[in-house]
Image (tube, rainbow, N blue to C red):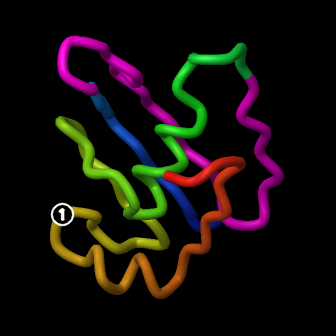
């Protein structure tokens, strides 16, 4: 079995009263090709912004390449690149 590259459990991100991402659970293995698809406003960009460390999650646990998002965000930011469609 391969190494887990990204693991997300119970992720939530809201903007005031508007919940953009609710209870997201995700596991992507190292070397796996993964597509994140959904309609406008589904939370795709918000999820990617959180994973890149550009946005802060309200709830949930994230691990990237074995690093804990809550403890190792500086290290994660040095490993992850993010280019949004529009400015974040």
Q: Is residue 19 left or right of residue 77?
A: left
Extreme front residue here? 87
Residue 78 belongs to magenta span: no
Report x, y in % for residue 18: 30, 14
In the image, which residues are magenta?
A: 15-37
Q: Position of residue 35 (x, y in %)?
A: 79, 39
Q: Measuring from the top left, give residue 60's x and y in whole percent.
A: 23, 39
Residue 26 colored in magenta in the image: yes
Badge 1 marks a residue whose secondary structure is loop
User: Compared to 56, does 66 lie above or below?
Assistant: below
Task: Name the quadrant containing residue 27.
Answer: top right
> Residue beneath label 1, please?
70
Q: Which residue: 18% across, 36% down? A: 59
**Residue 5 drawn above or below residue 78:** above
Residue 83 location, quadrant: bottom right
Number of marks in picture? 1
Closer-to-camera residue (23/86):
86
**Percent of width and height locating residue 65:** 48, 72
Is 59 drawn above or below residue 56 in the view shown?
A: above
Name the outermost residue toward the right.
33
- Crowd band around label 1 with a 10 angstrom C-alpha radius: few (<14), some (14–19), many (20+): few
Is residue 87 rendered to the left or right of residue 58?
A: right
Say left or right for 25 vs 72.
right
Task: Point out the image quarter for the N terminus.
Answer: bottom right
Residue at position x 59%, y 67% in the image:
3
Q: Residue at x 45, y 66 (%)?
A: 64
């Amino acid at each position: 079995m391969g190494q887990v590259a990204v693991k997300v459990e119970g992720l939530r991100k809201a903007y005031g009263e508007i919940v953009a991402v609710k209870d997201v659970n995700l596991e992507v293995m190292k070397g796996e090709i993964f597509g994140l698809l959904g309609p406008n406003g589904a939370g795709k960009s918000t999820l990617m912004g959180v994973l890149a460390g550009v946005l802060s999650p309200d709830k949930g646990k994230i691990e990237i390449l074995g690093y804990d998002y809550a403890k190792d965000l500086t290290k994660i930011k040095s490993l992850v690149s993010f280019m949004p469609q529009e400015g974040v």
